[in-house]
Image (cartoon, rainbow, N blue to C red):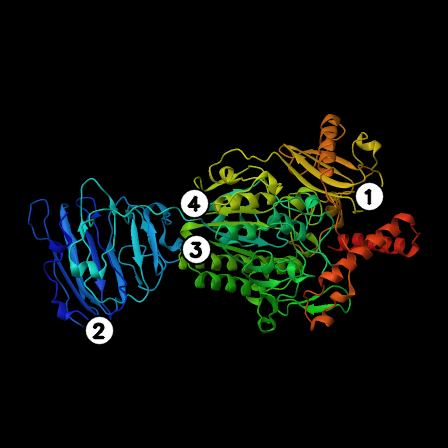
Amino acid sequence: MLQLSRILSRGVPPRSAQPTQSVSPSLSLRGPAHLPAGSPTVLRLRAGPEASLGLEGRGGGRRKGKQRLEKLGGGRNPGQKGRGEAQDGGEHFLEAATLHPRLARLSWERGSEGGAGRALGRPGETRRGPDLPRCPAEAAACPGGSLGAPGASRWAGEPCALGARGNEAWGALLRLDWRAGLEMHALTGFSLVSLLSFGYLSWDWAKPSLVADGPREDSAEQPSAAPPQPPHIIFILTDDQGYHDVGYHGSDIETPTLDRLAAEGVKLENYYIQPICTPSRSQLLTGRYQIHTGLQHSIIRPRQPNCLPLDQVTLPQKLQEAGYSTHMVGKWHLGFYRKECLPTRRGFDTFLGSLTGNVDYYTYDNCDGPGVCGFDLHEGESVAWGLSGQYSTMLYAQRASHILASHSPQQPLFLYVAFQAVHTPLQSPREYLYRYRTMGNVARRKYAAMVTCMDEAVRNITWALKRYGFYNNSVIIFSSDNGGQTFSGGSNWPLRGRKGTYWEGGVRGLGFIHSPLLKRKRRTSHALVHITDWYPTLVGLAGGTVSAADGLDGYDVWPAISEGRASPRTEILHNIDPLYNHARHGSLEGGFGIWNTAVQAAIRVGEWKLLTGDPGSGDWIPPQTLAAFPDSWWNLERMASVRQAVWLFNISADPYEREDLAGQRPDVVRALLARLADYNRTAIPVRYPAENPRAHPDFNGGAWGPWASDEEEEEEEEESRARSFSRGRRKKKCKICKLRSFFRRLNTRLMSHRI
């Protein structure tokens, strides 16, 4: 290859003609470009106002010395062009001189065949060939921007991708530094070389000082590969989204973004979560079952002095140790009675969202009983009064995009987006409701509008990942937190049960991974995965380590997801809740003396699933698209009260749990009861304290927030132990409690028939 001094010996203006103002170079391109013979390549540089552009080419085709490049431009008029064509193969050099002060636009006219689409990335970013993903075949499918078909162009400040259409594709980009502003003060040069045996495009750097002082000895060498950077991790969690409520599961709800991301990634069709909010979130952030965090029972109420155990090392804390910047947007619901419980004290650098379980989507008010209402939108550790009035789904997507815009892609990022959608109250912007105006069931109509709005929020976040240069090295994980609430428009059809139950409709989750880093994409995985597995999996991706001393219940499932290997997980403990109402017909004798079957518990081992106690409502509820269902049809799929406390299903053969095999396979029942007993021996006591009146928002300026100090916590624990001891010594009969229980069950039956 010719020396840089020879390449630039012609067409270079005198040093005095170059600007003397010292500004940072913006676009510096140099290096060989290898193109197949006979494939014309045209590079056009369009200069903006007050720009000077000079191009001079020399070189040869197959015959040495044959002139093939034209010289155009060189003035200061807007729109002047420099153009060079390489048509016959061989070596060609294209020189660009005095590109200053601002290059307005870069436009590709035609590409070479056989290359792979590559992303340019964001301003100020360097990318290397092996790290760059393929761009979709259709340019329109690249929301981050694409040069697309020949003749298309992008303004300099925009991120873009060298796309591919049909038989034309742009060459593989080995290295490119694309800087905002495109300010230059010295000669910028690049070369085009066409060789018969190569089909890729390689761009390198020439610093202004090197161009001015003389040739570089290593100008012909390719840059060494940079060490792999840990991937950016984006975890998107939705609230109460049913198994049936996504387009690729045959839903009547429009979710084009989720459908596309799942189709291009890996769908998780054997993925399990917990039946309610707090347990799923606690297991995600700790990698431990509920029995190992003391959160076996119910959720954390706003007035309870309870939160995620402070001795647990959370997922964001572990990622911070690996050098990650960590951010959370959305619903926390893991306790806040002390400041040490807040997200910013549990591993997140920033936080915007709600601390309680459900708030108004516009006003962010939350009521935990009559007259116990408060504002719940926080930024960091302060109340975000000024953000009230914005629809939460859109607000959270905007904040996620802002985080991406202000963060450097060179530092690994963990972004946890926990949407409030589609939890009650059922509220949606009017424009989304209009799409479902023909849907007869009002609750389903509002619910569908909320799902579609959330889908568009995910699209905006994905677009921001591409726009700001994160996408090529990112892992996007989508998950629901529990089954859909059928009373509020959700659907888990054809699975059995709903939110709050341990039937498949309550614990089978929506989930997929979308990432350019996946080795096997566009497929469906049936590997067994649980929400606790994300902790070790993401720590492993980040370059961190976990050991047996961490006491995790999760497994690293990345090889199973990315490469299609067998899952290391063979069983899941769904839960053991000793405080839940004991089943009337359960007993220790019914559990072969191994396990008290009156206790609510659920476990899956291999293809077998065992439930004991009261697993919750076991109805099969079809999608509620009609305003009302005929009672006769509804009752066909309803479970009458049964006198049993043990169920056994072969989930692989019977995923809808319609054939109970407990009576036919007592050997399997006995083995799974023994596993429950083994797990129970490792459980810690349930932490479910009584509500504290000090938590009332009126004592905190009208907003929900921390209220307890260390001394108050110790006093509360002593009182709780005293109450437990008192209950153990004497148990009073409570007639009013029985009446309340009766009317609660009656109301539930009436509501079921009404829906």
The type of residue carrying mark 1 is His
Marks 1/3 in contact by CB < 8 Å: the verdict is no
Marks 2/3 in contact by CB < 8 Å: the verdict is no
> Residue tagged by mark 4?
517
Q: Is residue 703 left or right of residue 432?
A: right
Q: CA distance from mark 1 to mark 3?
A: 51 Å
> Residue tagged by mark 3?
411
Classed neighbour count for the residue bearing mark 2: other residues with Cα under 10 Å, few (<14), some (14–19), many (≥20): some
Marks 3/4 in contact by CB < 8 Å: the verdict is no
The type of residue carrying mark 4 is Leu
User: Based on the displayed image, in which of its 4 quarters is residue 550 positioned?
Assistant: top right
Q: CA distance from mark 2 to mark 4?
A: 43 Å
Q: CA distance from mark 1 to mark 2?
A: 81 Å
The type of residue carrying mark 3 is Gln
**Residue at the image point whose x is 13% and y is 70% from the top:** 16
Of 23 and 633, the residue lying toward us? 23
Classed neighbour count for the residue bearing mark 1: other residues with Cα under 10 Å, few (<14), some (14–19), many (≥20): some
Marks 1/2 in contact by CB < 8 Å: the verdict is no
In the rendered image, residue 357, in percent from the top left (x then y), is placed at 67, 59
Question: Quick one: label 1 or label 2, which is nearer the N terminus?
Answer: 2
> Residue tagged by mark 1?
582
Secondary structure under the numbered disc 3 in the rendered image: loop
Marks 2/4 in contact by CB < 8 Å: the verdict is no
**Residue at the image point whose x is 20% and y is 71% from the top:** 20
Front of the two marks 1 and 3: 3
Question: Quick one: label 4 or label 1, which is nearer the N terminus?
Answer: 4
Of 521 and 516, the residue lying toward us? 516
**Residue at the image point whose x is 93% and y is 52% from the top:** 732
Q: Residue 50, which numbered label?
A: 2
